[in-house]
Amino acid sequence: MNRQRILSVFKGSSFVLASASFVTFSSELQAAKCPSQAPFVFREGDTLSEVLWYLGSEPVYGKRGWIEKTWALNPSQTHLRGKEIPPGTKLNIPIKECPMRGGWTLENGLLVAPYNHPKRNNAASKSDAQIAASQGQALSTAAPTASPTPKPTPTASPTPKPTPTASPTPKPTPTVPTIPEPPSTDSPSPNPAATASPAPKPTTTVKPITSPQPAVIAPPASSKQKTSKDLLKNIKESKDAFQKTNKNENEFINNLKNDSEFQIEKKQ
């Protein structure tokens, strides 16, 4: 079945659409269930003209498939024409054929460039022979992504423990005993009373000073009446002192109430 391929030529900031040759798609390609469009994620360093060249104006790598037409810019993305495209920018690409035919893969709905893409520095690049050998495989299977070779984890060498150096034990210095000189016979005999050690002074134990407890003196039987009078007198004096204190407090409160500042605060 013949399909017309529309080429998109990048010229300045405008697109020139021109008709091109027809491309024959085999029944095998038509039977493949490919999405009608998939977003293309621009990578760092890709420009709009380079992406158009890789996807539209030339066949995809290996000449095993064609993209029917290049993607159309969204109205909100026209400012990207001819400029560096920020990494991660997504644009819809209408795809006629499975991108796996040309080495392109779909990963999580994103169109990923082939392994031998010059912009992709992938160590496991897919050669043309490998792409040709993979033609017999099912078209719906995506090209396997190269698993990164695991880096060998460096084994930490055990740090050598420092051998403790035994400190030499110091040798004891021999003590020379001092021999007392014998008393000379010429010297007078010492006075035993003078050399006698003084008698030790008796140590006085300091008793803690305790506050003297008032002695409770029982009043004599004859002075019971006098003591009762004294108690009554003390009670009366205490009562008078309490009343005087209470009177002073009442006067203070009354003076405070009559104070002008207190009245102002009370009104507020």
Image (cartoon, rainbow, N blue to C red):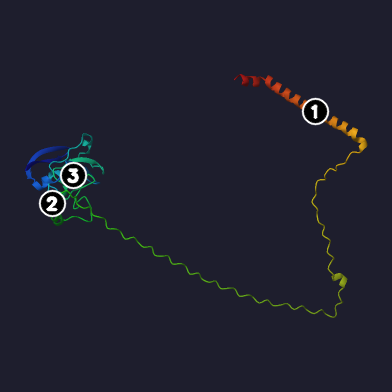
Of the residues under marks 1 and 3, which one precedes in the sequence?
A: 3
Say the numbered circle drawn on residue 62. 2
Q: Quadrant of the N terminus?
A: top left
**Image quadrant assignment for residue 53:** top left
**What element does badge 2 sit on?**
helix
Say the numbered circle drawn on residue 127. none
Could you tell me how far apart the alpha carbons at marks 1 and 3 are, in whole angstroms?
110 Å
Q: Residue at x 80, y 28 (%)?
A: 239
Of the residues under marks 3 and 2, which one precedes in the sequence?
A: 3
**What element does badge 3 sit on?**
helix
Of the residues under marks 1 and 2, which one precedes in the sequence?
A: 2
Q: Quadrant of the C terminus?
A: top right
Is residue 82 at all visible to an observer of this figure? no
Q: Position of residue 15 (x, y in %)?
A: 14, 38
The residue to which callout 3 is attached is 51
**Image quadrant assignment for residue 128:** bottom left
The residue to which callout 1 is attached is 239
Q: Residue at x 18, y 41 (%)?
A: 37
Is residue 246 at all visible to an observer of this figure? yes
Could you tell me how far apart the alpha carbons at marks 1 and 2 are, in whole angstroms?
121 Å
